[in-house]
Amino acid sequence: AQSVTQLGSHVSVSEGALVLLRCNYSSSVPPYLFWYVQYPNQGLQLLLKYTTGATLVKGINGFEAEFKKSETSFHLTKPSAHMSDAAEYFCAVSITGTASKLTFGTGTRLQVTL
Amino acid sequence: NAGVTQTPKFQVLKTGQSMTLQCAQDMNHNSMYWYRQDPGMGLRLIYYSASEGTTDKGEVPNGYNVSRLNKREFSLRLESAAPSQTSVYFCAIQDWSSGNTIYFGEGSWLTVV
């Protein structure tokens, strides 16, 4: 079984500031990890994913995340926030195997202020 | 939305009515999923289908039925809608060729009054 915990349901940053959205996971086998973004009244869009290999993963819109096995974390960062980054962000974990299911965190709403 | 089409996009139902949400993919993937999204609860898996002809329950299957008609289509049926089923529903497909990445449709907003 797997689970995901996102710390902080709401995060507010100033435009130009560092964005840090936290995600910790639990998995009994090597996980696949994902970050999705959801803009208001839209579906979920894949930001980035970790499967195997390099632990620092770069995604779209300047976001990146680092897989840290020892800390069971997959935090999402962006060096400089932009107003257009305001959205809800979901961390998710999937285990290997057939019909592996994606388990989501409860989401973090990012607010970007001037 | 990576070739995942959901219909309808919006629907209002009265309690007790039935309806079917349709999902179709154009990418020939085996695995398809139905999730619901509720405020503060993230996305929860209702049912999934690992391949044509097979379906399995997810975390919150009660009140729903599904049908994997063929490889392309996966429908979700509410036999007797309840206000607790007011939610946003997402269909998704799984791409095994890209590290199990799951791609979502654009969602179906359902309100049960």
Image: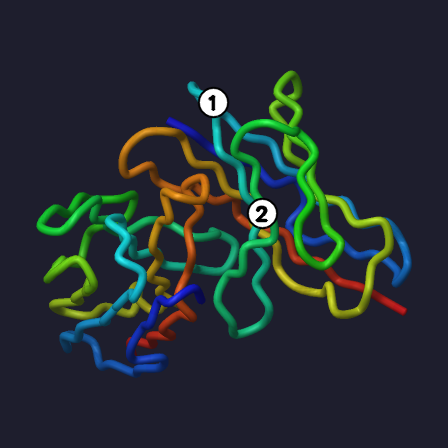
**Number of numbered labels in the structure image:** 2
Q: Amino acid at mark 2?
A: Trp
Q: Chain of mark 1?
A: A
Query: Along the line of sight, which residue is nearer the eye, A59 or B79?
Result: A59
A9 on left or right of B110: right
10 Å neighbourhood of mark 2: few (<14), some, or many (≥20)?
many
Vertically, is A27 above or below A113? above
Image quadrant in which you'd find residue A14: bottom right
What residue is shown at x 29% (from left), y 69% (from top)? B83
Vertically, is B1 above or below B31? below
Question: Which residue does the numbered mark 1 point to in the structure image?
Answer: A30
Per the image, label 1 sits on a secondary structure element best described as loop
* Residue A70 x, y percent position in the rendering: 65, 16
Q: Amino acid at mark 1?
A: Pro
What residue is shown at x 38% (from left), y 29% (from top)? A96
What residue is shown at x 80% (from left), y 69% (from top)? A83
A32 on left or right of A112: left
Which quarter of the image is occupied by the C terminus of chain A?
Answer: bottom right
Per the image, label 2 sits on a secondary structure element best described as strand
* Residue B104 x, y percent position in the rendering: 41, 60
- The answer to whether dots 1 and 2 both sit on one chain is yes
Residue A35: which disc? 2
10 Å neighbourhood of mark 1: few (<14), some, or many (≥20)?
few
Image quadrant in which you'd find residue A16: bottom right
Q: Chain of mark 2?
A: A
Question: Residue extending furthest top?
Answer: A70
A44 on left or right of A61: left
* Residue B68 x, y percent position in the rendering: 14, 58
